[in-house]
């Protein structure tokens, strides 16, 4: 079956789903679920997928929230670049005694970026909470402050694709207020 034929079929299914689903009081998400057959994750744990993918048309119904852990010029540049929250390393150290606050922080933000020279000092506090949730910060050297705006912009348009214990991938590819072509473009990515 040609790729063009498959794309037409998927586009037709997306259009049909958007037309036939009843209207809700909120903007619904459009999710893609892919079940992979013939993969045994118990025998081959390396087959697991854990990637961050930048979408060409990010879903409009939910904003991706990014927190930056840093201080000084790094923190100032992060705030200017559109980070939702800038966290000082001292604030992480005070949260260390209360795992509940760290769990809340991990739930509240989709991605974390940390200043490279600070990360080794705070990883012992955030690692046990952020690690299992796959929220460990992206490591960015303090000298790479100029790359921070571009990284934040990229992460704001990204989704995490993760396959844990079962051979299936579940990812948000759009929202109801997007047109089917935009959703199809996200699926192809």
Image: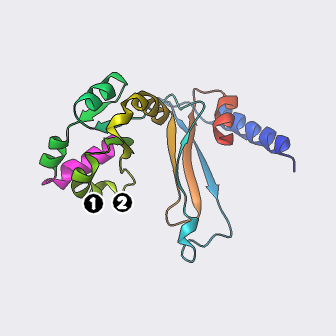
Estimate the x, y position of residue 13 in percent, counting from the top left: 73, 40
Q: Is residue 43 above or below residue 181?
A: below
Name the residue that disc number 1 marks.
128
Estimate the x, y position of residue 74 in percent, counting from the top left: 29, 31
Q: Residue at x 28, y 48 (%)?
A: 119
Q: Is residue 164 above or below residue 180?
A: below
Name the residue that disc number 2 marks.
132
- In the figure, is residue 48 to the left or right of 144? right
- Locate residue 168: give its quadrant: bottom right
What is the magenta range? Answer: 96-109
Q: Residue at x 54, y 31 (%)?
A: 58
Q: Residue at x 40, y 31 (%)?
A: 148
Can you name the residue that lies furthest to the top here?
A: 80
Circle 2 crowding by C-alpha within 10 Å: few under 14, some 14–19, many from 20:
few
Q: Is residue 106 magenta?
A: yes
Q: Name the main secondary structure of what is drawn in magenta.
A: helix
Q: Secondary structure at mark 2?
A: loop
Can you name the residue that lies furthest to the right here?
A: 1
- In the figure, is residue 101 to the left or right of 2? left
């Amino acid at each position: 079956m040609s790729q063009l034929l498959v794309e037409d079929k998927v586009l037709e299914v997306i259009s049909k789903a958007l037309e036939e689903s009843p209207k809700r009081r909120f903007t619904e998400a459009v999710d893609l679920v892919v079940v992979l057959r013939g993969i045994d994750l118990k025998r081959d744990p390396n087959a697991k997928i854990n990637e961050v993918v930048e979408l060409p048309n990010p879903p409009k119904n939910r904003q991706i929230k990014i927190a930056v852990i840093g201080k000084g010029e790094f923190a100032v540049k992060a705030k200017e670049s559109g980070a939702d929250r800038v966290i000082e390393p001292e604030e992480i150290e005070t949260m260390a005694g209360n795992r509940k606050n760290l769990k809340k922080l991990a739930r509240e933000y989709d991605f974390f970026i940390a200043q490279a020279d600070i990360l080794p000092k705070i990883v012992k506090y955030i690692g046990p909470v952020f690690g299992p949730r796959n929220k460990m910060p992206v490591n960015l050297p303090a000298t790479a402050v100029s790359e921070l705006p571009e990284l934040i912009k990229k992460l704001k348009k990204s989704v995490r694709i993760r396959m844990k214990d079962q051979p299936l991938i579940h990812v948000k590819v759009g929202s109801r207020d997007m047109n089917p072509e935009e959703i199809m473009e996200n699926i192809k990515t």
